[in-house]
Image (cartoon, rainbow, N blue to C red):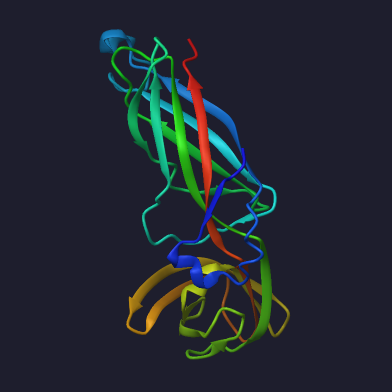
Amino acid sequence: MKTTKSILPALLISLTASTAAVAATPDVTVKQIGATFLEAPPGRDKNLTPFGTFGNQESVETHAVVIFKDRVIADIPVFSNDDSKITAMAILPNKTQTSLGPVKASSFRKVSEDGKKTLVSLSVSRLPDGGVSGVAFSGFVKLPVATSITRNSVPFQPKVGAKLDVGLGNSVISNIDSTSITLSGDDRLMGIAAVKIVKADGSTISGERGAYSRQGGTNGTTVSAQWRFTGPISAGKIEVSSYRDLTTIEVPINLIVAKPY
């Protein structure tokens, strides 16, 4: 299925480098890959409850892979609640439907190594007492995507106040210790995909995301981003990979889990 709408939340506006490049609708499909259907036994008889479950436990869960052909899924921190909107409808034996309310998507995003695929899991934990024939999930999930990843390498001096001219605004080192650095700047720091330091002797150390903070004020928004490294930090070059044309899109979800018995 194709996406039909692309949006740019306020948080990511300053990250967009080229509006023309992101004008085209991303090519995305949603592939359902599995489901589980656990219905409470008739009359909620605890003697009929499957081993390892509670007496009145019910759940219908489905999993899907979202696949992008021409975008990279961005692994970036989220400071606000996920505003994806998905609802579940119980399909009754008489073919009518009744609402089961809003559904939360899985909170931990799993992304493939090439950045083109991500797993979405949806579930409901309560079904109508009269029994159902299936459950339909519909709505959309919001995912941050980019057209590509760019890399910039500049000389690196491990000292507080040093500027990093890597195409992400006026980024500076605001804190440093033996194995981590904290960068301060504007919202463009949210677009960092990876950081690597190449030492003077040619050896490299890679960074992992640490703490993030975002504060708004009269002089604009300030973002602090910590990166923790696999070894001691020293002078050399720093290579920063960042997402190009970062935006957030709504991916339509329309999945059905049929009762298997």
Query: Is residue 123 or residue 28 the one in the foreground?
Result: 28
Residue 189 appearing in the image: no
Query: Is residue 111 or residue 31 the one in the foreground?
Result: 31
Q: Position of residue 52 (x, y in %)?
A: 37, 22
Picture residue at 27% right of the left edge, 10% below the top: 45
Q: Position of residue 215 (x, y in %)?
A: 35, 74
Q: Quadrant of residue 230?
A: bottom right
Tally the numbered discs: 0
Picture residue at 66% right of the left edge, 52% below the top: 113
Query: Is residue 196 or residue 40 the one in the foreground?
Result: 40
Q: Quadrant of the N terminus?
A: top right
Q: Position of residue 133 (x, y in %)?
A: 43, 14
* Left-right relation of 251 to 238: left
Looking at the picture, does residue 181 appear above or below residue 83? Answer: below
Looking at the picture, does residue 42 appear above or below residue 6? Answer: above
Q: Position of residue 225 (x, y in %)?
A: 46, 73
Picture residue at 43% right of the left edge, 75% below the top: 223
Query: Is residue 67 or residue 108 the one in the foreground?
Result: 67
Residue 72 appearing in the image: yes
Picture residue at 50% right of the left edge, 85% below the top: 172
